C-alpha cells in the first residue's frame, strides 16, 4: 500500500457520523471506475457503509450479469464512454469525495484520469487505485483479474487435487 498527498488543498472535514453508527460513510460520494471483482467488492462495501456510490461502466465492456448484480448491490450505475462523455464525467467528479479505479496502472491516463490530474480538477479528492499486480515491478503494466491472481499466487494449486490438477478457484 502506498499513500501520497496529491495536492496542497486543505484537508476536507466530513460531517460526523449521523444518527446511525452502522453507516459511517454516509455523506461520502464515490465514483466507482472498477470492474470484475476486487474493485466492485471494495466499493460495494463503501455503499453498505452508507456512501453514495455511482459505478461508471464503459458501454463496450460488458460483465457477467449475476456478478454485476452482486457487486453492484447498494450502488447506482451508469454507462459512460469516457472519450465522448468527458463533460458528464467532469460534472460527476465535481461532487465526488472519492474516486476508485480498478484498471492496470496507466490504462486511464489517456482520459486524464491520473490521480494527480483528478486532484488538480477536484482538490481534496481521495483516489484509490486497485490493480492485479500493483504499480511497480515486472508485472506492473499487465492486465489481471482475480482468477489470474489466484493461479499466479498458488491458490489454485492449494485448492487442487493430490494428482496436481488445479482446483476450483474460491472466488469464482
Image (spheres, rainbow, N blue to C red):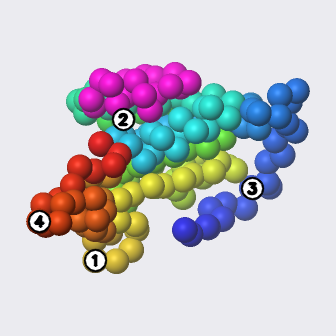
**Which comes before the other along the chain, label 4 or label 3?**
3
Depicted 159 relative to depicted 17: above or below? below
Badge 2 or badge 1: first in the primary sequence: 2
Determine the residue located farthest toward the bottom in the rendered image. Answer: 137
Q: Mark 2 sits on what residue? A: 82
Residue 162 is situated, as x and y percent measured from the top left of the image, at 17, 66
Label 3 sits on a secondary structure element that is loop
Front label number (1 vs 3): 1
Label 3 packing within 10 angstroms: few (<14), some (14-19), many (20+): few
Instruction: Read off the residue under disc 4.
Output: 163
Q: Nearer the viewer, mark 2 or mark 4?
A: 4
- Residue stretch in magenta: 63-80
Mark identifier at residue 138: 1
Q: Quadrant of residue 14?
A: top right
Cα gap from disc 4 to disc 3, whole angstroms:
58 Å
Q: Which mark is residue 77?
A: none
Q: Secondary structure at mark 1?
A: loop
- In the picture shown, does residue 145 fall above or below 2? above
The image quarter containing residue 6 is: bottom right
Magenta span contains residue 70: yes
Q: Quadrant of the C terminus?
A: top left
Instruction: Give the percent coordinates (x, y) of residue 93.
Output: 57, 36
The nearer-to-camera label among 2 and 1 is 1
Instruction: Name the residue tied to disc 3.
Output: 9
Mark 2 near mark 3, Cβ–Cβ under 8 Å? Answer: no
Residue 107 visible in this rendered orientation of the protein? no
Mark before the other along the chain sequence, 1 or 4: 1
Q: Is the residue under label 3 in contact with that under label 1 (CB below 8 Å)?
A: no
- In the displayed structure, does residue 39 sit left or right of residue 153? right
Amino acid at each position: 500500500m502506498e499513500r501520497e498527498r496529491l495536492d496542497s488543498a486543505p484537508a476536507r472535514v466530513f460531517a460526523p457520523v449521523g444518527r446511525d453508527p452502522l453507516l459511517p460513510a454516509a455523506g461520502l460520494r464515490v465514483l466507482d471506475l472498477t470492474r470484475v471483482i476486487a474493485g466492485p467488492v471494495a466499493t460495494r462495501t463503501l455503499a453498505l457503509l452508507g456512501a453514495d456510490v455511482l459505478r461508471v461502466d464503459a458501454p463496450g465492456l460488458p460483465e457477467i450479469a449475476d456478478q454485476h448484480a452482486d457487486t453492484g448491490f447498494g450502488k447506482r450505475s451508469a454507462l459512460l464512454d469516457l472519450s465522448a462523455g468527458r463533460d458528464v464525467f467532469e460534472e460527476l467528479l465535481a461532487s465526488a469525495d472519492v474516486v476508485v479505479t480498478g484498471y492496470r496502472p496507466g490504462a486511464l491516463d489517456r482520459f486524464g484520469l491520473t490521480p494527480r490530474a483528478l486532484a488538480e480538477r477536484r482538490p481534496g479528492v481521495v483516489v484509490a487505485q486497485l490493480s492485479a499486480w500493483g504499480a511497480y515491478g515486472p508485472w506492473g503494466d499487465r492486465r489481471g483479474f482475480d482468477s489470474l491472481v489466484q493461479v499466479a499466487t498458488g491458490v489454485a494449486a492449494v485448492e487442487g487435487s493430490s494428482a496436481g490438477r488445479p482446483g476450483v478457484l474460491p472466488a469464482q
